[in-house]
Image (tube, rainbow, N blue to C red):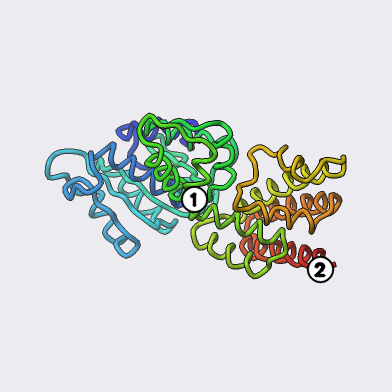
Amino acid sequence: MVKIDSRSVGKVLGAPDNWRFVLLHGDDSGLIREHAAALTRQSAGSLDDPFRVSLLARDDHSRFEEEATALSLDGGRRVVWVREATDGMAAAVTSVLDSPANSLIILEAGALPARGKLRKLAETRPDSASIGCYPEEGRALEASVRRMLEERHVRISSEALAWLAGRLGADRAGVRNEVEKLALYAGENGELHLDDLMLCIGDSGSASVDDAVFLAMEGDKAGADLALERALSEGANPVAVARVLLSHIGRLRRVKAELERGQSRMDAMKTLRPPVFFKKQQSFERALDAWSLPALLDLAKRTQAFEFACKQTGSMDVLLCRRHLAAIAGRAALSRRR
């Protein structure tokens, strides 16, 4: 069985000659596309060589066997890159793999069942590999961001990296776009700090998530709805919304606890690292007025339950996200009116 874990993906992408068939499947379409491009470039030297690369969209699937068994006119190994693959292609792929043809077959698929035909085929043949592509989070996401920046000879502080990872969307393409923008801002051999990130990503989808969370917590339901829809349209994931929300709740709880110990609001706010972005400071203080410490603890528990529900197979995560933020905004607005 050749089921590739995340630590071994680089070895597969760097040695396409070891494989005849690579299946890329999962929920992260950006990561799937990135891996497919890397394999194609490594094997054929470019993505657009008409003699060695055949790119098949859904409407071209009927040409798969013809393309996969054709000979390269320049003698190099051909790559047949198929997008939107389904289990219906399993028989055709098996037929090609059982033939003398030596093309590299790359299939992009979405989420496939563990016992599906394509996954079974890729995971049982020694000349094939199955790579699951799922949104990264936590330390894995931080490691990927740091690696992308290092490829561009850019350093990032630990504080800035943690802040960025908590606000990036789930899709790899969106993550890479943000990293490329930051690398361009820093320049070769540059270094990124928290202030740089706050300046650079102010118009990103991640900022839309921040806006949705801050506005909901202060009781602005209309503003939160608008910001959430923008974030979702730009590729944000409900789980990422939950993570930003939990971080915001935690910071509010810390300041609330300091206030109850007798600290002034100014001094309590100064305990936060990183500090509240100056453009968000008024919103943060309005949320402080709307939520008590016990209410914040209860909200943290409900948000954790919301995140868990989003991760369940078949869950209506976007609907759950909209409802959760709407309930938060309604509760905050009622509290502030009182």
Going by the image, does 75 lie left or right of 194? left
Q: Residue at x 70, y 48 (%)?
A: 246
Q: Quadrant of residue 329?
A: bottom right
**What is the x, y in percent for residue 210?**
60, 54
Q: Is residue 311 visible?
A: no
Q: Nearer the viewer, residue 115 or 208?
A: 208
Badge 1 marks a residue whose secondary structure is loop
Q: Earlier in the sequence, mark 1 or mark 2?
A: 1
Task: Identify the residue at the far bottom of this view.
Answer: 222
Checking the image for residue 337, the label placed there is 2
Checking the image for residue 331, the label placed there is none
The amino acid type found where label 2 is placed reads: Arg
Q: Residue at x 12, y 45 (%)?
A: 73
Q: Nearer the viewer, residue 170 or 284?
A: 284
Q: Nearer the viewer, residue 234 or 34?
A: 234
Real-space Cα separation, disc 1 to disc 2, in angstroms: 39 Å
Task: Report crowding for label 2: few under 14, some 14 to 19, many 20 or more residues within 10 A (C-alpha).
Answer: few
Checking the image for residue 171, the label placed there is 1
The image shows residue 123, relative to residue 294, as above or below, that is above
Marks 1, 2: nearer the viewer: 2
**What is the x, y in percent for residue 115?**
54, 49
Quadrant for the C terminus in the image: bottom right
The amino acid type found where label 1 is placed reads: Asp
Q: Residue at x 39, y 34 (%)?
A: 12
The answer to whether the residues at label 1 and label 2 have Cβ atoms under 8 Å apart is no
Badge 2 marks a residue whose secondary structure is helix
Q: Residue at x 36, y 45 (%)?
A: 36
**What is the x, y in percent for residue 337?**
81, 68
Q: Quadrant of residue 191?
A: top left
